[in-house]
Image (cartoon, rainbow, N blue to C red):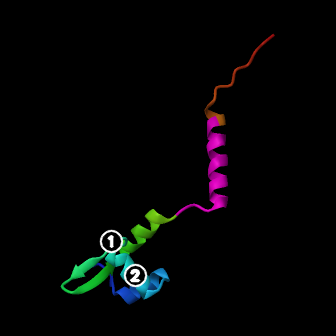
Amino acid sequence: MKTLLTPQQAADYLRVKISTILKWTHFGYIPKIKLGGAVRFDLDELDAWMEKRSTKGRAQLKVSAYESQTQRAIKRPIVLHSD
């Protein structure tokens, strides 16, 4: 069964003002469900929306860059020259 939140509950969950939720809803920025005249928010959809919108912090970007450099170095063939 889906967990549906009211606009106030969604605002509390996302830690934003209710006016922000209403503005996002009006402009179609946030996933919503309309039930008659009521607007509700599916908790799983909100989690997926937040995950999609999240960005990596600097520390994660540095680690990712280091890991990709390491992976490229590992994939390069080692050529030994014998003189």
- Per the image, the residue denoted by label 2 is 21
Is there a contact, CB below 8 Å, between mark 1 and mark 2?
Answer: no
Q: Is residue 24 magenta?
A: no
For label 2, the crowd category at 10 Å Cα-Cα, with few meaning under 14, some 14 to 19 and many 20 or more, is some
Q: CA distance from mark 1 to mark 2?
A: 10 Å
Would residue 19 appear left or right of 80 to someone viewing this image?
Answer: left
Q: Residues within 10 Å of mark 1 (few under 14, many from 20)?
A: few
Considering every residue shown, the one lying at the far right of the view is: 83
Name the residue: 57% across, 61% down. Answer: 56
By secondary structure, the bulk of the magenta-drawn segment is best described as: helix
78 vs 7: above or below: above
Q: Residue at x 21, y 83 (%)?
A: 35
At 34% from the left and 77% from the top, the residue drawn is 25
Residue 40 falls in which quadrant of the image?
bottom left
Instruction: Say which quadrant the C terminus sits in.
Output: top right
Residue 29: % across, % down: 37, 71
Q: Is residue 61 left or right of residue 37?
A: right
- Towards the viewer: 77 or 45: 45
Q: Quadrant of residue 13?
A: bottom left
**Residue 72 image position (x, y, % from top left):** 62, 36
Instruction: Give the residues in magenta.
Output: 55-72
Precedes in sequence: disc 1 or disc 2: 2
What residue is drawn where x is 33% and y is 79%?
A: 41
Residue for badge 1: 28
Q: Position of residue 31 (x, y in %)?
A: 33, 72
Q: Is residue 77 above or below residue 68?
A: above
To which quarter of the image does residue 50 belong? bottom left
**Is residue 56 rendered magenta in the image?**
yes
User: Image check: 68 left or right of 17?
Assistant: right
Question: Which quadrant of the rendered structure holds the N terminus?
Answer: bottom left
